[in-house]
Image (spheres, rainbow, N blue to C red):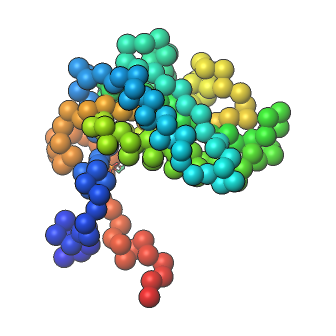
Amino acid sequence: MSDGDVRDRPEMHPALASRFSPMSFDPDVSVTPEQIDALLEAARMAPSAGNSQPWMFVVGRRGDAIHERVVRHLATSSSMWAGAASLLVVNLAHVYVEGTDRWAYSEFSRYDLGQAVAHMTIQGLHMGLDAHQFRAFDRDAVATEFFVPPHWEVTSMTAFGVAAHVSDDTSCPGTSRERATRAEITWLRA
Ligand SMILES: Cc1cc2nc3c(=O)[nH]c(=O)nc-3n(C[C@H](O)[C@H](O)[C@H](O)COP(=O)(O)O)c2cc1C
């Protein structure tokens, strides 16, 4: 029995234990403005290096004009499922000092953005929303579409909604959920 075996897993927070990235979303579910506020609040309160808060988000709710503009730039692969999600959030990292293309705003910008997005997704789980983060879209085109200035980077996107399948649905095409073992990810441990 490896530590990938469910019988050998330490107790985890239920939201984390059941989390997965859905490959299809229920197209009848909508998110409320209050839920969007709660997602943004979770990101806002995430820790960051020197409290630099190097994140910004473009939020498109299915059916609104922003969502329509985001959907145009999905890759073929993500367009199969992301458009049906209730919400698409484009994740932006503050990478350079304004007016420069080489002076790092913070060496931890992308790290901090990732953490803010993680907090958002956990807040989503708390509200019954699943999330699928992805990069399968035209990042340059999204930057142009929303006039993102060059010192900000369009880094990734998150689709939020309610999964339309269970996590171990083998009929659902998707990337591997195989994990390295705990031993493999531990460089040193007494
Ligand atoms: C930064 C990032 C980029 C990703 N890009 C894609 C993507 O382009 N397409 C996709 O289907 N999944 C994408 N994923 C989802 C991963 O493939 C997924 O998290 C991984 O296979 C583990 O599966 P799980 O989240 O269901 O545990 C991405 C995840 C992250 C964090």
In this view, the residue in front, 74 or 92, is 92
Indicate the position of residue 52 as horizontal and vertical percent values: 68, 47
Q: Nearer the viewer, residue 120 or 104?
A: 120
Q: Is residue 70 something one can see in this rendering?
A: yes
Q: Residue at x 61, y 51 (%)?
A: 48
Residue 188 spot, x, y in % from top left: 48, 82
In the image: residue 120, left or right of residue 168: right
User: Image height check: is 76 above or below 39?
Assistant: above
The spot of residue 26 in percent (x, y) is 23, 27
Quick check: can you spot residue 156?
no
**At x 51% / y 31%, what residue is drawn?**
90
In the rendered image, which quarter contains the C terminus? Answer: bottom left
Instruction: Please give left or right for residue 111 compared with residue 170 in the image.
Output: right
Identity of the residue drawn at 28% across and 62% down: 12
* Residue 167 as seen in the image, left or right of residue 56: left
**Vertical side of 76 occupied by 41: above or below:** below
Give the mark count. Answer: 0
x, y percentage for residue 20? 29, 47
Ligand 1's image quarter is top left
Question: Most extreme residue toward the bottom, as rendered?
Answer: 190
Examine the image and state in which quarter residue 85 appears: top left
**Position of residue 114 in the picture relative to residue 21 (left or right):** right
Q: Residue at x 61, y 20 (%)?
A: 146
Q: Nearer the viewer, residue 147 or 140?
A: 147
Q: Dividing the image into 4 quarters, which one contains the N terminus?
A: bottom left
